[in-house]
Image: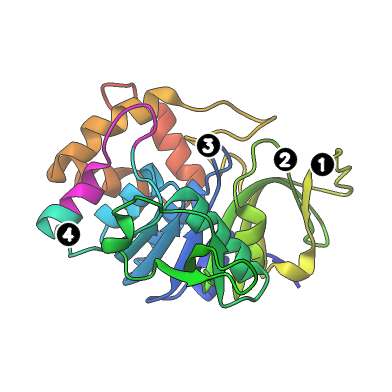
Amino acid sequence: MAEIISLREAIGSLLRDGDTVAMEGFTHLIPFAAGQEAIRQGRKDLTLIRMTPDVIYDQLIGAGCAKKLIFSWGGNPGVGSLHRLRDAVEKDWPKPLEIQEHGHGDLSNAYVAGAANLPFAVLRAYAGSELPQHNKNIRFVECPFTGERLAAVPAIRPDVTVIHAQKADRKGNVLLWGILGVQKEAVLAAKRAIVTVEEIVDNLNAPPNACVLPSWTLAAVCHVPGGARPSYAHGYYDRDNRFYQAWDDISRDREVFLNWIKKHILDTEDFSAFQRVLNESTKEQLV
């Protein structure tokens, strides 16, 4: 059953060095606050999983928190490369990073298999693709009914899944809506799940087709308003496109990146303080 605790407590007690961690959220509800708290607490040797690693994983990788990345696409959306990811893969800075690349359909099905407590996922994919030559975890099986050749990948079962959502009630049930990726499946596949939320309310009043994660699927719920910034939270705030553009310059240079991380994350007490420091900066002063 979920406890309603601070984000500092949740990361401190539930996210451990060496864990396999999924931080999911598609275009919006990206759990930036939780990722930055992991940096603030100096987590290391993490295996990071994300269908679309973007700026939050660039920050974690550049801060030296990761040893491996399992993913199906990586980049700064609408801008370009993830420079800290590239530096780690190409030049082993700040440490070597092992990568395991999948397709979107592959990785999403692997989450579904993990949520269903199955050993692997089966899908029609990779006909004519060279990716299986570079990922030994993409294999092929024969359907026992039709004889069709199908792709198979291991189920994803994170030690910890972290997501951001719009609301929780006081019992720890969580509501999220808008564009959903694999948040539900990632939570159900995990040993432990942490959810940051915009607000805690007496009644969720769930709209039709919204996703409700019951308290028993979660370990911790943390009240962190703005916890998805600079991504957006549908119904609460917009995407900060200026930040994503600025990140290209911040992350391109190692020294500039380290100074930014120190000022905005390591030297701030929590995500609220991070937001204050960031809001005080102009576009030119973000670095």
Q: Which residue is mark 3?
A: 27
- In the rendered image, residue 261 lying in the magenta stretch gets the answer no
In the rendered structure, which segment of residues is drawn in magenta? 76-88
- In the rendered image, residue 84 lying in the magenta stretch gets the answer yes
141 lies left or right of 95 = right
Residue 173 lies, in percent from the top left, at 79, 58
Answer whether labels 2 and 1 touch (C-beta < 8 Å): yes
Q: Which residue is mark 2?
A: 177
**How many C-alpha atoms fall within 10 Å of the one at disc 2: few (<14), some, or many (≥20)?**
some
Residue 129 lies, in percent from the top left, at 34, 51
Q: Which residue is mark 1?
A: 209
- Say which label, 1 or 4, has the lower sequence index: 4
Location of the N terminus (image quadrant): bottom right
Residue drawn at x 44%, y 75% as measured from the top left: 16
The one of 141 and 194 positioned closer to us in this rendering? 141
235 lies left or right of 148 = right
Residue drawn at x 18%, y 56% as measured from the top left: 89
Residue drawn at x 64%, y 43% as measured from the top left: 180
* Image quadrant assignment for residue 178: top right
Q: Identify residue type, mark 2.
A: Trp
The one of 74 and 118 positioned closer to us in this rendering? 118
Q: Identify residue type, mark 4.
A: Pro
Q: CA distance from mark 2 to mark 1?
A: 8 Å
Q: CA distance from mark 3 to mark 1?
A: 19 Å
Q: CA distance from mark 4 to mark 2?
A: 37 Å
**How many C-alpha atoms fall within 10 Å of the one at disc 1: few (<14), some, or many (≥20)?**
few
Q: Which residue is mark 4?
A: 94
